[in-house]
């Protein structure tokens, strides 16, 4: 599995050696092989590429393993690990990355995981990383079944975007909702379900027959509005307002 378990003291000495002191609620930092450091938000790791967003309103940037020297997360992120072989492993806390290794902790267990043996690092909802960054966006499924209620942010309006990447309207309106969430100071949270078609397991499970769709959950976590056919900017803003009022 390419995994080495280390004692806690050794693990954190290694982390301190590769990364500067973490600032409370600061940006994540991705250091490239040419020593250029990018500040923004780490969005995940997929098919040997780091997905990084430098600005909430722009598309994600992909940097492949060979181009990345280190990653510092501020604060650490809750993730699930999808190895190249074997089942996915949830409940990990990702502390960082350096020279081909992810540094992870889960309870009292600490480990390094070789990046070449990881297919995907998927972000899980984490209120600590949401706080101070706006609501942010999180991919909660890439076609596999998902319990949406587990990803709803209580106390805020949560918008779940069932995203079809090949659809221009899905890209455009999804970006609009994400910008609204980023500028909402935590009042709106944005979650994305990425699918390649409505024949995928998550669509069958939720009876989704058209894409894209936007589902709006009220601050109590109840589904308040579904936009399935029309989703203009006015429609989206009206749906957020209705969800904020508890669907009334």
Image (tube, helix red, strand yellow):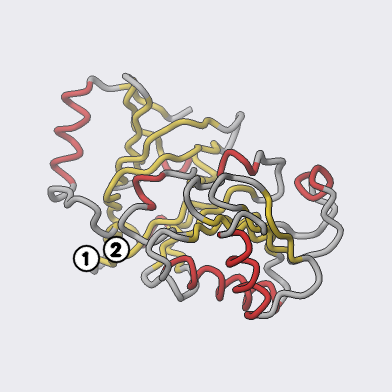
Q: Quadrant of residue 93?
A: top left
Labelled pair 2, 1 in contact (Cβ < 8 Å): yes
Q: Quadrant of residue 213?
A: bottom right
Q: Residue at position x 31%, y 43% from top? A: 76
Q: Which residue is mark 1?
A: 35
Placement of 127 over or under 7, stated as above or below: below
Q: Nearer the viewer, residue 24 or 164?
A: 24
Residue 1 percent location from the top left of the image: 48, 27
Q: Residue at position x 68%, y 75% from top? A: 235
Helix, strand or loop status at disc 1: loop
* Disc ID at residue 32: 2
Placement of 55 over or under 70, stated as above or below: below
Residue 18 percent location from the top left of the image: 18, 46
Helix, strand or loop status at disc 2: strand
Q: Residue at position x 65%, y 51% from top? A: 142
Binning the other alpha carbons within 10 Å of mark 1 as few (below 14), some (14 to 19) or many (20 upward) gives few
Image quadrant containing the C terminus:
bottom right
The mark tally for this picture is 2
Q: Residue at position x 72%, y 41% from top? A: 145
* Disc ID at residue 16: none
Residue 56 percent location from the top left of the image: 42, 70
């Amino acid at each position: 599995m390419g995994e080495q378990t280390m004692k806690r003291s050794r693990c954190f000495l290694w982390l301190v050696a590769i990364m500067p002191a973490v600032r409370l609620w600061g940006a994540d930092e991705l250091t490239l092989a040419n020593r250029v450091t990018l500040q923004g938000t780490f969005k995940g790791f997929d098919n040997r590429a780091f997905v990084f967003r430098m600005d909430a309103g722009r598309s994600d940037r992909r940097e492949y393993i060979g181009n990345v020297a280190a990653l510092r997360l501020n604060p650490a992120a809750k993730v699930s690990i999808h190895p190249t072989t074997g089942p996915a492993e949830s409940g990990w806390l990702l502390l960082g990355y350096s020279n081909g290794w992810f540094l992870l902790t889960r309870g009292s267990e600490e480990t390094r995981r070789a990046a070449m043996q990881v297919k995907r690092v998927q972000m899980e909802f984490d209120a600590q990383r949401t706080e101070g960054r706006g609501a942010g966006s999180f991919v909660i499924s890439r076609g596999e079944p998902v319990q949406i209620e587990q990803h709803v942010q209580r106390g805020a309006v949560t918008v779940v975007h069932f995203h079809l990447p090949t659809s221009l309207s899905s890209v455009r309106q999804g970006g609009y909702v994400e910008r609204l969430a980023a500028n909402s100071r935590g009042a709106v949270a944005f979650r994305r379900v990425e699918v390649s078609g409505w024949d995928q397991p998550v669509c069958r499970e939720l009876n989704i027959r058209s894409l894209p769709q936007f589902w709006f959950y009220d601050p109590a976590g109840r589904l308040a509005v579904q936009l399935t056919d029309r989703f203009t900017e006015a429609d989206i803003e009206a749906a957020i307002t209705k969800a904020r009022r508890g669907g009334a």
